[in-house]
Image (cartoon, coloured by chain):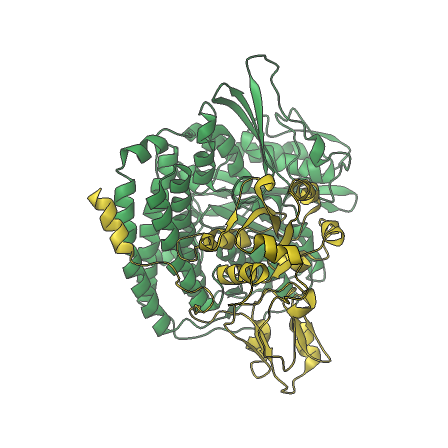
Chain colours: A green, B yellow
Amino acid sequence: MNYISIKNNQTIPVADIPVLDYQQFSETNISLLSKHADRHCVNYFGYIQGNSIKLVSCIADDTSHEIYISSCLVDSSKKLESMSSRLLCFEKFEREIHENFGVVFENHPWMKPVRYPYNRADKSSVMDNYPFYSIDSEELHEVGVGPIHAGIIEPGHFRFICNGEQILHLEIQLGYQHRGLENLFLQKKKLLQRVTLAESIAGDTVAGHTTAFCYLWESLSGFDPKPEIDFYRTLALELERIAIHTGDLSAICTDIAYQLGSSVFGRLRTPIINFIQEWGGNRLSKGLIRPGKTQFPFTKELGDRLNEILNDYEPDFNEMCKELFKLPSALSRLERTGTVSYDDVLNIGAVGMSARMSGLLRDIRTTHPYALYPQLNHKPILKHHGDVYSRAQIRREEIWQSMAYIRQLLKDIPESKANYEMPIKLKPNAFSISLVEGWRGEICHCAITDADGDLAVYKVKDPSFHNWLALALAVRNNEISDFPICNKSFNLSYCGHDL
Amino acid sequence: MLDNLKILYHQGKQFIPDVRTAKVPGIFRGRPIINSHKVNVTELVDLCPMNAISSNPVSIDLGKCTFCGECALRFPEKIKFTTDYKISTNERERLIVKEGDDFAIEVNPVTVRKEIRKIFGKSLKLRQVSAGGDNSCEWELNAANNVQFDMSRFGIEFVASPRHADGIAITGPITQNMAKALEIAYNATPDPKVIVLIGTDAISGGIFADSPALDRSFLENHRVDLYIPGNPAHPLTIINGLLDLTRKKK
């Protein structure tokens, strides 16, 4: 076999991953993905091993619920034939490997910097000399926006090429948020420090990223999941989904200047995050999720309280949705704005909402289930137009779905509390992968341990890593004035991408 | 039209009438109290992931603390987090809570620059700059402007251009890649201007403090007027901090 099949959250010895030569490696991965819409690359990364670079590829199969891992050793001075020239979904991964280690991929369609990490291979490549695409024409003009934007949001630079009011091309330059996070996972030795890092990957996806970290850590420790811990995490993930989706609907209303929707959805987010604070002491779930622990007791009283909050939330939410989703002036801004086709989301490897909006099923809760999702029997919500309206609809319907899941979970609140000490040393020379469906989409954490059982590699992939390209495609041929609404409807993470 | 009125009616009154005395629900972790109970101090100091706890006397630096509450869970007889969210101050040392301290953390009116209260006492417009912020403090800053917290009722607002601003509000540990843009935004802001640091990451670098990807030289070159701790800072902490800085206590 050219690859090894594992399940989500499974740990295997690194030695079990087949090491191929690059030719075989690329053929294997390309043939795994070609003509298989039910497979996608969840991670493809490199790390230094001796004098060479080890490349590891993880292809998830949504039908068999397995992940195919393969690897190869390459010399950074050698030129490699890029896989992106045949399958576009590898483009960002190859750019990252090139940026980090200087590996040259020939015939790559778009070899641009990813995030300017402090330890990049080529220090002469700096933020100020990003090689923007440009078109020489007297008819066209360029518009540059950012890194600092008008609102209170994270930094990133957007460069538009416009024909009058129409966007021909958008290029997104990121990296402003780069904090050296992956290396800090290795440098910080305390588990509590590492879990704090996981909480800081993206402050709007605390439950998502911390859950991925915890399952990964537990798997590498040989700790079996406990149902009471799964309960806590599932609940936190679905609460986070409701909270952020509600906030996003508010933001979408803000960007079409619909004041009522903006205020009502904005205020509806508050009771949900205030409940997270009642439970764990922090509105954004920080400090709530820990490996091997149910950190803050979820009592019967909290369950009643949450039911009460959802019962209050639901009629107000529905009333506002009913109004928004039938208002002609709102619909005319949402429908057919910022569309991405099924073929495009498939080709670029989009995940989560950004795939489901165009009819592509990508939802780890169904395809690689973890926590309590198997028993919730999750059915992903698919839309088919790939426009702002589809993305708004997904949010509305996922909120309904999450409320139903939470109500079901609350019928059976586990009595027992978990407090297991996690070992400081993990299984030595092991590889593990953890996939979690955050509210944005699939979060993937991978780790490799050294001979002493300490972390040697920690790799984080936020769904935004793929989905920024979906935004760039979405705005093509739209009016530039529709950019904010397109951007908000994706609501991608800058820090999750820049790490 | 009637539908709209119905929706408005169904929301009831959402705004918090008095943001200075409002209670936060549940087990919010605000200003800690450390009592004189004897515990294994080495273990306590070692427990903190942020190195925010020191010994002799035992103290917690809220500029480094992520308010994870681990110390209070492990040493409940020694450390307790109160729900006091008014923890912003203009002096860095005031963020260090020592054993036995049980008094409010406040802005020291003596050391506030005179022009701040004179000029910004009734209106303060800030340009927010996220420099490696993880989008949690950004969410809370946006929340401070929602219909519940409604910070703009005090004339405090966030504006799009630094040229329209009276100061810069920084979130995040200040990354190398963002350092230049931050400096440009600051220089574009007309004098007199304030600098506000929001969140643990901005105040001390947080969990990223010793990362080589940061460049915090901006803070060595400019005076900080207000520290608003939290991970993220609560909207009530933000509003009360800004009010304390810009106007006299009523």
Image position of B121 (left or right of A491) = right
Residue A89: percent from left, percent from top: 54, 33
Q: Quadrant of residue B187?
A: top right
Q: Nearer the viewer, residue A418 or A12?
A: A418
Q: Nearer the viewer, residue B53 or A118?
A: B53
Instruction: Give the residue drawn at x 22%, y 45%.
Output: B3
Image position of A339 (left or right of A210) = left
Is A31 placed above or below A322 here? above
Instruction: Give the residue drawn at x 45%, y 40%.
Output: A488
Q: Quadrant of residue A478?
A: top left
Residue B162: percent from left, percent from top: 60, 41
**Quarter of the N terminus of chain A within the rendering:** top right
The residue most toward the front is: B118
> Can residue B44 be seen at all in this image of the molecule?
yes
Is B194 placed above or below A35 here? below
Q: Quadrant of residue A53?
A: top right
Residue A374: percent from left, percent from top: 38, 56
> Can residue A359 be seen at all in this image of the molecule?
no
Is B132 placed above or below B23 here? above
Q: Nearer the viewer, residue A280 or B165?
A: B165
Please state the total of marks drawn on the protein image.
0
Residue A104: percent from left, percent from top: 71, 31
Instruction: Give the residue drawn at x 79%, y 43%.
Output: A51
The residue most toward the top is: A138
